[in-house]
Image (cartoon, coloured by chain):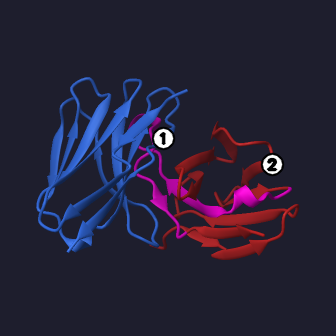
Amino acid sequence: KAGVTQTPRYLIKTRGQQVTLSCSPISGHRSVSWYQQTPGQGLQFLFEYFSETQRNKGNFPGRFSGRQFSNSRSEMNVSTLELGDSALYLCASSSVGAGGRDTEAFFGQGTRLTVV
Amino acid sequence: GQQVMQIPQYQHVQEGEDFTTYCNSSTTLSNIQWYKQRPGGHPVFLIQLVKSGEVKKQKRLTFQFGEAKKNSSLHITATQTTDVGTYFCAAVTGRDDKIIFGKGTRLHILP
């Protein structure tokens, strides 16, 4: 079974530009979460999508947005990029276990975004 | 909002020494998960604890869930160089099924 696939792996953008990152979850997984990882802040939760609906949201500005398609693939968009947005962006998919609770999260390799 | 505190942030140990990382939540959890991220890699699931007071072992790794389901620990006995990485706890609340990660403990092994 294929794992979680994130594209692109690396990206360099200029301040003020926008960027779209893509995540293909494990087949059958309907929950997709996005995280920002920086050396000093660990894993910061951005948002979670489940069946095309945003189910949970972290404390990030409105420049960060996402969506999920009917095939569970998800995209994350960051507009008006700032230097501080440079980070590893990780996507994780999970299935829904008994009682509606997510099971373990399977992470992709991440997209390393550098804003210059 | 929900807070998950993980300590210590960094730990240097001599190879062969033991290592423990702790995770504390401000609220009662439905379950807690542990992940390991090797340098340059992505987090990989290790284990999930669900029951109050639960203890699980994986070879040299021992995972505990507190009686009140608000804290957890990961203990590694006799560390090896392959244990290098960052260990994250991830708390799952019952209210909204959100998975909240701690900031992780970075383990460095001195040869």
Residue at position x 38%, y 49% in the image: B9
Residue type at numbered disc 2: Arg
User: Does residue A8 appear in this view?
Assistant: no
Residue A103 relative to residue B21: left or right: right
Is label 1 in contact with label 2 (beta carbons under 8 Å)? no
Mark 1–mark 2 distance (CA, rounded to whole Å)? 21 Å
| Quadrant of the rendering where the N terminus of chain A is positioned | bottom left
In the rendered image, residue A88, in percent from the top left (x then y), is placed at: 60, 64
Q: Which hue is chain A drawn in? A: red
Residue B91 in magenta?
no
Chain given the colour blue? B
Please give the label number shown on residue A63: 2
> Which chain does the residue under circle 2 lie in?
A
Q: Residues within 10 Å of mark 1 (few under 14, many from 20)?
A: many
Q: Secondary structure at mark 1?
A: strand
Residue B85 relative to residue A115: left or right: left
Please give the label number shown on residue B56: none
In the rendered image, residue B78, in percent from the top left (x then y), is placed at: 11, 62
> Which chain does the residue under circle 1 lie in?
B
| Quadrant of the rendering where the C terminus of chain A is positioned | bottom right
Residue type at numbered disc 1: Ile
Which residue is tagged 1?
Answer: B100
Q: Is residue B15 above or below residue B95?
A: below
Start and end of the magenta stretch? A80-109
User: Does residue A95 appear in this view?
Assistant: yes
